[in-house]
Image: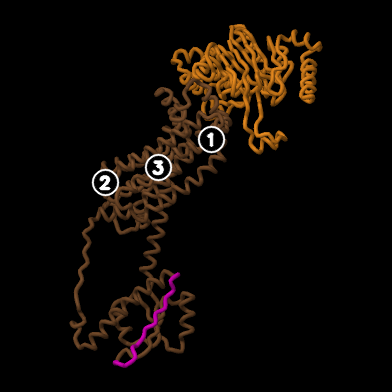
Chain colours: A orange, B brown
């Protein structure tokens, strides 16, 4: 189980970033008072436009960065106090994380297995399973640099799952993938959910959220503006689909912020 | 902890040793390039010396007394060609010297054969930017000196009276010490440069490169302590740097028979009698020097967001190291204080090992100072690895 309680994260902007954001403020609050909980056997989706705070929330959960305030609890461990224990139990996959181009899939799998403290037999067992699942066997011996982007993506997923984590965090899981690889990934996420894993994804693609997520959190300007099952969100907003629901909430939050 | 450091080290070393192109670039090319470059340079310097000794110095004289011509033909029968002219040719002769058609010009004014109230004068002209002219100047000085003795002997009526004392020239330095001194002049600087360059080549890619490629974050997401990741990378880089430097050292040694003129010449390869203790001490000092270089490169690489930025940070550090190593050419510090300066102490110690003047105590001071420096740099690097701001780009 993952429990996020009232987390806030503010970044100091560089001059270049200030210029890009068209602001004179030296700081930007990426995430503000975000709270949600995800249970095992559930896929939770953080849905929001670019720059809404999805990636920052996921990076806080995966211990890459710490929230300024609030707490995140992963399987009973605090991300700030027990970051090592948290990392043993979760994996994060984003498009920014890459497999080292100088090594083969085979070598990298063993390497990350060792870093996760796994024994040789355990690594081999897991390798056999994941390589078969993602069809990596065919290119296990070639250097990552020589792989196609689809192969690389599959390898990155396999590497992040090497230690069989119980919490799986995917940032934009289908971004940049061809239709077949994207389907492989979404099917696998469902399989993980069915195995009782806690799955959290971020996306800005409505159809992905609709088809994949058991619950959705709509995040805008660093705040969770709506949360619940697809049906609940549609009922609350009175919209026919998630797309309309999203824009209805988006408009409402814009009006409020303008009034403020 | 040890296991994790070892696993990361193995991966980093595998990357360098198993990548044929990189291994050739880091380990083979420095030695090979240096061996070829130094052999060529040594050959060229040797050729320059040979050309100078084979060259017949052309000396233009104006109103030269017979005594000068005779003395010159006695001392340099084949090495000096004297062309005599008259006082009216001064302007033309100076032009000749400037153009390099003659190597020296001597104008004799006054009477050199008889005593007179006014002392005769020799005006000597050479061209200091032309090597043949400079060496012709030395030859002319030797002839004038002998001529002076001959004139004096004639005045005193007895050549024996011109002898005031005898000088014998003795050198107590052993052949191996002379060879050590010659090689110890430049080699410490070269080794320093090789060590830094070897570490820089791979170092920038190890951290800043991994940040740029997005592969460092993958490692940061494992339960491994960030300190272990930093140390694993640092230790492996030290090994790579040292191996690269040993390759360069091998290149220097291979080229010695052809390049000893670069190191001052005047010694034979057989004069270099370094034994196992010297080599062990040399490797030890190089190891600590390499550790401090690697710690600097790793820290700067950690602070940078990409390879380009890391290059920008490391280039000034390289210049500082270059200046420090250059300063060791001009002598060693008095007493022990200099050995407490990190890196400088190691370079001086390397010089002392090569010149057989190594003091174990000073060597120890250098090692301790460098260890403290490397430890501080490593702590800063580990802090940077733990810093959210520094790792944001990872």
Label 2 marks a residue whose chain is: B
What's the CA distance linking mark 2 and mark 1?
39 Å
Instruction: Tell me the crowding category of disc 2: few under 14, some 14 to 19, or many 20 or more residues within 10 angstroms, Cα based.
Output: few
Identify the residue at horizontal 42%, vertical 39% (top origin).
Answer: B241
The quadrant of the image that shows the C terminus of chain B is: top right
Judged from the image, the secondary structure of the residue bearing numbered disc 1 is helix
Residue A184 visible in the picture? no
Label 3 marks a residue whose chain is: B
Mark sitting on residue B359: 2
Q: Is residue B105 above or below residue A178?
A: below
Q: Is residue B345 above or below residue A93?
A: below
Q: Does residue A217 appear to the left or right of B61 in the view shown?
A: right
Label 1 vs label 3, nearer the camera: 1
Residue A41 visible in the picture? yes
The question of residue B119 being in magenta is answered with yes
Identify the residue at horizontal 44%, vertical 31% (top origin).
Answer: B13
Question: Residue B333: horizontal and vertical position, in percent?
Answer: 33, 52
The quadrant of the image that shows the N terminus of chain B is: top left
User: Looking at the image, which is closer to me, B209 or B78?
Assistant: B209
The residue range painted magenta reads B114-129
User: Looking at the image, which is closer to me, B146 or A143?
Assistant: B146
Question: Residue A37: horizontal and vertical position, in percent?
Answer: 63, 11
Question: Residue B103: horizontal and vertical position, in percent?
Answer: 42, 75
Instruction: Tell me the crowding category of disc 1: few under 14, some 14 to 19, or many 20 or more residues within 10 angstroms, Cα based.
Output: many
The question of residue A240 being in magenta is answered with no
What's the CA distance linking mark 1 and mark 3?
22 Å
Mark sitting on residue B245: 3
Dot 1 or dot 3, earlier in sequence? 1
Label 1 marks a residue whose chain is: B
Residue marked by disc 1? B208
Judged from the image, the secondary structure of the residue bearing numbered disc 3 is helix
């Amino acid at each position: 189980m993952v429990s996020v309680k009232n987390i806030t994260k503010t970044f100091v902007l560089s001059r270049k970033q200030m210029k890009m954001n068209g602001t004179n403020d030296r700081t930007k609050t990426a995430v503000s008072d975000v709270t949600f909980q995800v249970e095992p056997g559930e896929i939770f989706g953080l849905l929001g436009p670019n720059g809404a705070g999805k990636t920052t929330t996921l990076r806080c959960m995966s211990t890459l960065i710490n929230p300024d305030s609030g707490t995140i609890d992963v399987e009973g461990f605090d991300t700030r106090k027990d970051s090592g224990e948290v990392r043993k139990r979760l994996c994060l996959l984003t498009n920014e994380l890459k497999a080292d181009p100088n090594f083969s899939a085979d070598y990298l799998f063993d390497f990350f297995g060792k870093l996760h403290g796994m024994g040789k037999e355990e690594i081999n067992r897991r390798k056999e399973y994941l390589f078969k699942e993602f069809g990596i066997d065919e290119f296990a011996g070639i250097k990552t640099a020589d792989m196609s982007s689809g192969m690389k993506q599959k390898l990155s997923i396999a590497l992040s799952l090497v230690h069989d984590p119980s919490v799986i965090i995917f940032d934009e899981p289908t971004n940049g993938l061809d239709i077949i690889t994207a389907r492989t990934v979404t099917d696998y996420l469902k399989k993980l959910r069915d195995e009782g894993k806690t799955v959290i994804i971020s996306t800005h693609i409505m159809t992905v959220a609709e088809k994949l997520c058991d619950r959705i959190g709509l995040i805008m300007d660093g705040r969770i503006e709506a949360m619940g099952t697809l049906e609940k969100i549609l009922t609350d907003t009175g919209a026919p689909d998630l797309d309309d629901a999203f824009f209805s909430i988006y408009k409402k939050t814009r009006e409020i912020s303008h009034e403020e | 902890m040890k296991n994790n450091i070892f696993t990361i080290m193995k991966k980093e070393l595998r990357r360098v040793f198993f990548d044929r192109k990189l291994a050739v670039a880091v380990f083979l090319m420095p030695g090979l390039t240096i061996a070829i470059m130094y052999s060529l340079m040594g050959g060229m310097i040797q050729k320059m010396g040979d050309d100078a000794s084979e060259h017949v110095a052309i000396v233009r004289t104006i109103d030269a007394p017979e005594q000068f011509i005779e003395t010159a033909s006695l001392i340099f029968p084949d090495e000096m060609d004297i062309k005599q002219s008259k006082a009216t040719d001064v302007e033309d002769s100076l032009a000749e010297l400037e153009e390099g058609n003659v190597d020296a010009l001597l104008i004799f004014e006054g009477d050199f054969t008889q005593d007179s109230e006014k002392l005769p004068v020799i005006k000597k002209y050479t061209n200091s930017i032309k090597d043949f002219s400079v060496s012709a100047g030395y030859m002319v000085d030797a002839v004038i000196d002998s001529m002076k003795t001959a004139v004096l002997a004639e005045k005193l009526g007895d050549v024996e009276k011109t002898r005031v004392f005898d000088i014998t020239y003795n050198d107590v330095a052993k052949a191996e010490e002379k060879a050590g001194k010659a090689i110890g002049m430049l080699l410490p600087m070269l080794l320093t440069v090789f060590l830094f360059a070897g570490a820089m080549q791979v170092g920038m890619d190890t951290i800043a490169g991994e940040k740029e490629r997005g592969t460092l974050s993958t490692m940061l997401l494992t339960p491994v302590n960030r300190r272990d990741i930093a140390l694993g990378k640092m230790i492996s880089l030290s090994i790579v740097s040292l191996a690269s430097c040993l390759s360069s050292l091998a290149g220097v040694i291979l080229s010695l028979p052809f390049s000893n003129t670069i190191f001052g010449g005047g010694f034979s390869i057989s004069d270099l009698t370094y034994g196992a203790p010297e080599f062990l001490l040399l490797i030890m000092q190089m190891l600590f020097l390499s550790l401090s270089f690697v710690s600097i490169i790793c820290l700067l690489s950690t602070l940078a967001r990409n390879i380009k930025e890391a290059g920008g940070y490391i280039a000034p550090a390289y210049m500082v190291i270059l200046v420090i190593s250059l300063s060791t050419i001009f002598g060693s510090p008095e007493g022990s204080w200099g050995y407490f300066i990190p890196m400088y102490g190691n370079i001086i110690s390397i010089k002392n090992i090569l010149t057989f003047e190594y003091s174990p105590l000073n060597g120890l001071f250098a090692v301790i100072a460098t260890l403290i420096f490397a430890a501080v740099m490593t702590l800063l690097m580990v802090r940077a690895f733990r810093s959210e701001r520094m790792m944001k780009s990872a």
